[in-house]
Amino acid sequence: MSPYLHSLAQWLFLHLPGWILAGYIASLVFIFIYSLSQAHLMLHYIRSRRKSVRLPKASISGELPYVTVQLPVYNEKYVVARLLESVAGLRYPAHRLEIQVLDDSTDETTEIIARKAAELSHLNIRHIRREDRKGYKAGALQEGLAQATGQFIAIFDADFIPEKDFLLATIPQFLNARVGMVQTRWGHVNENQNLLTRLQAFGLDTHFTVEQTGRYAGGFFLNFNGTAGIWRKSCIEEAGGWQADTLTEDLDLSYRAQLKGWQFAYLEGVISPAELPPFLSAYRAQQYRWTRGAAQNTRKHLLNVVRARLPWRQKWHATAHLLNSGLFVSVFISSLLSVPALWVKNLVPAYALYFQLASLFILSFLVFALFYFIPLFYRSGNGKEAIFSFIRTYPVFLSLSMGLSLHNALAVLEGYTRKKTPFVRTPKFNAAIFTGSARKVSRVRRPFSGLLLLEGLLVLYFCGGVFSAFRLGDFTLLPFHVLLGAGFALVFGYAWKEPARLPY
């Protein structure tokens, strides 16, 4: 061996285990600290359930205010007619209601809208077209806002089917003059379409129960979820309007408004049904936009939150909320380093104490398990049923989340930079038309991408972690390596099976 290679080998032997340990523990510490904020939200959610805390059932006497319903659409030929029909069915005085179809489409969606608007000519439907898609969804919403006649602005994405009483349930909450936005809970019309939709519903239900209710009950910052909510027009204007410098304009406006002193309300009992992406590519597109946009908002608002004059608990949860996208990076780093860390633990006795301390941070995974169990318990009302449902669903959900960690971590890292990227919409399909896990629109499989190749290699990598457990006789991390291997295999298998051409 040359002197150079010998020196490099010595350096790696002396220093690499320390770097592996440091990176592994640092990522676990971040996950643990974030889990503490989630545990606190969970406690607020449990207290609100036990005390039966609900928003007051306000009612408006006299004439109802003017409302504008905004429907931002882009190439939504499968769902736009259903959207217009459901909005037309809202129980609200027609002379107090304006419907804006913010149409940036480049396909037959525009013709479908025109025909459906003609059928619903008894309503005030405005079909608004722009010369270009500048600002994407945020640009369309801002364009509509400038022309809106309503005092309040309700927003629905193309795949939503609002309940008839949506406006009558949400408008009374604005009797409090400081309430700037009311968010409702998402429902799922195709939850049982396939495994992917069931797992999405499981995760979203926790967000819309424990997280959103916990934040509201604790008086912490809420976020508008981009749809199925209603804004006070003056709140949007005072906060600076819709801005397109992040991919999640909803989170951006939420923080700008609340930092200016506006209050948000959350109605867990008002459900707005929608469809979940039934294809992995559609789900990835959604996850990419959400995670990258969240990271962009971290860059944009974190210092503003830290400097703001807010109660420390409110500031703590706002900081955790903005940093939650970093969880994907920490999960991937800890997962990647867990295999060599297992060998360091068993071959370098000097680090044994550090690994014993690191094992304490794995308790955060128990916190997350309880976090996802709680809504099942309250929804079923039966502890045994909730346990069985949790055992069937949570391990697969956790495995899929781990399998997407590389994809989401890359999106987050890109979001921390100032690189410009287009707004990639989540394709909408209409489950009544496209049933099953995938419609056979093409027999041609998707070509291997660099990301897919890496995910396939990670399946083998974490299988190596499973082998290492038996080779070393240390089974501490075996459950995680099994879940990681299965998760990346699940993602790889879904991507490999999915046709190259889908109906979007």
Image: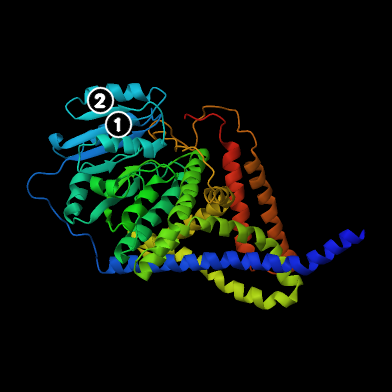
Q: Which residue is mark 2?
A: 117
Question: In the image, what residue type sits under mark 1?
Answer: Val
Judged by depth in the image, the label closer to the viewer, 2 or 1, is 1
Q: Which residue is mark 1?
A: 101
Lateral position of residue 480 relative to residue 463, left or right: left
- Residue 321 in view, yes or no: no
Q: CA distance from mark 2 to mark 1?
A: 9 Å
Callout count: 2
Residue 309 image point, x, y percent: 35, 66
Lateral position of residue 63 relative to residue 323, left or right: left
Secondary structure category for the residue under label 2: helix
Q: Nearer the viewer, residue 130 or 330?
A: 130
Q: Nearer the viewer, residue 31 or 459?
A: 31
Do the CB atoms of the residues marked 2 and 1 lie less than 8 Å apart? yes
Q: Quadrant of residue 145?
A: top left
Question: In the image, what residue type sits under mark 2?
Answer: Ala
Neighbor class of circle 2 (other Cα within 10 Å; few <14, some 14-19, many 20+) is many
Residue drawn at (52%, 49%), measured in percent from left and top? Answer: 415
Residue 443, above or below 92: above
Q: Nearer the viewer, residue 392 or 92?
A: 92
Neighbor class of circle 1 (other Cα within 10 Å; few <14, some 14-19, many 20+) is many
